Each structure stands twice: as structure tokens, then as C-alpha cells.
Amino acid sequence: MVSAILESIARLITSVIESMGYAGIFLLMGIESACIPLPSEIIMPFSGYLAFRGRFDLTWVAVAGALGCNFGSVFAYYLGSWGGRPLVERYGRYVLITRHDLDLADRFFGRYGDWAVFIARLLPVVRTFIALPAGIARMNVVRFHIFTFLGSLPWCWALAYAGFKLGENWPSLRHYFHEFDAVIGVIIVIGLVWFIRDRWRNRLRAG
């Protein structure tokens, strides 16, 4: 059952990117930045792999991903601004947002202020939820978007570049695998298992 769900999500990610191109990258990264568990650690490397195959340009892959982060963060920002933490705590569990996630993002924002948005976008986990405390604090919207984009761009580029290099090194891997697409599929499924399992454990700890 779980395996079938994960495979369906993996197929969704790959099919959206392959069919929609840069718009698909934009959309999926927007969903991830709206605090919905669709990990960029899968979206961007696969996009980078397609850049290696000549489907995309690596730079534009990173730009599309970063712009998607801005787009999705608008939802999370205004959710925090409008409903505050009580609303997020009440309904966040339905998309696997835990109190632990919110505490982490709150502490990060409290420590670094507006710069937390830029710094957090370069880090796993906290990057997904940093827009919520920024919205709760009613951070200046223009600064929020600037820091979101500037922090998201190197993150997206690094992940896409990793996927690109993996494709570039395929000749040294062909001794072990017959088709590189199978490798990508395995990586996607493993990544999804780890991500959702981690989200679920944090949710259980939060009660």
C-alpha cells in the first residue's frame, strides 16, 4: 500500500516535469514551499538530470525552481500573517507540519530576524517552513520575496547540478545498471520514503 503510494508520487513528480517543462518545476517547487511535503531534494535533481539529457538548461532549471519557491511561499506567508500560529498548529498536521517544525522555524526567525528567510532557504527542513514565522511577524513583503529568491536560487542550483553530474557520470555506472532511468526511480522512491517517514515521526512526537 505505502509502496504503491510512493511510486505514484514519484511518477507524478517525473511526469509533471517531463510534460510541463520549466512550468512543472515552478509548480512543484511552489507546492513544496507552500509547506506541502513534496521534497525539493527530489524535484531539483531530477530536473538537473533532464538538463544533462538536453531537455533543459541548467541555469533556467535553477531559476524556475527559485521562482516557484517565491510563488509557494506567498501562501505560507499569508497563512501565518492572517491566522497566526494557532491556525497553523490546528490544520498543519493534515500536511504533516508538526509543532517541532514550527518551533524550529520560530527559533530560527527569532535569532536571525529577516535574514533568517535568506539563511533558511539554504538549509533542509527549516527552509520549507520559514515563511510561516515570517508571515506571523509580518515581515516586509518585498524583503521577504527578495530574501526568498536569493536564498532559494543557490539551493535549487546545487540540487539540480547534483542531478546533472550524476547523469554526466553515467558511463562509470553502466557496469552496474542497465538503464539510468531505473536509478533515478530508485533515488526518488528512497527519498520519498525517508522524507515522509521523518515527517510522520515528528508528527507522532508532537502528539
Image (cartoon, rainbow, N blue to C red):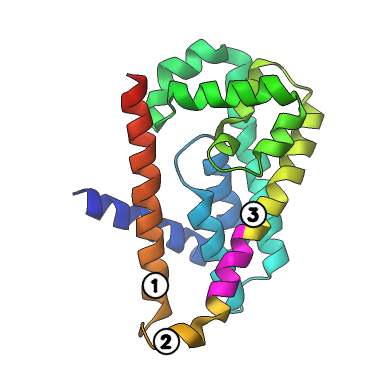
**Could you say where residue 185 lies in the image, as x and y percent from the top left?**
37, 67
The residue under the point 73% across, 26% down is 112
User: Residue 18, how many percent across, how many down?
Assistant: 50, 66
Is 37 displayed left or right of 111 in the figure? left
Q: Circle 1: is it few (<14), some (14-19), or many (20+) Cα within 10 Å? A: few
Viewer-proximal residue among 141 and 205: 205
Label 3 packing within 10 angstroms: few (<14), some (14-19), many (20+): many
Overall secondary structure of the magenta section: helix
Spatial distance from mark 3 to mark 1, Cα to Cα? Answer: 21 Å
- Occupied quadrant, residue 69: top right
Disc sitting over residue 149 in the figure: none
Name the amino acid type tagged 3. Answer: Cys
Identify whether 65 is placed above or below 85. Answer: below
Q: Is residue 28 visible?
A: yes
- Residue drawn at 68 percent across, 40 percent down: 70
- SS under mark 3: helix
Q: Amino acid at mark 1?
A: Val
Q: Is residue 161 magenta?
A: yes
> Between disc 2 and disc 3, whose residue precedes?
3
In 3D space, how far apart are the residues under numbered discs 2 and 3 (Cα atoms)? Answer: 27 Å
At 71% from the left edge and 63% from the top edge, which residue is drawn? 60
From which residue to which does the magenta span run?
Answer: 159-166
Could you tell me which secondary element the residue under label 2 belongs to?
Answer: loop
Q: Which residue is mark 1?
A: 183
Labels 2, 3: front one:
2
Q: Which residue is mark 3?
A: 156
Circle 2 is placed at which residue position? 174
- What is the distance, in whole Å, between disc 1 and disc 2 at their CAs? 10 Å
Residue 21, image x, y percentages: 58, 64
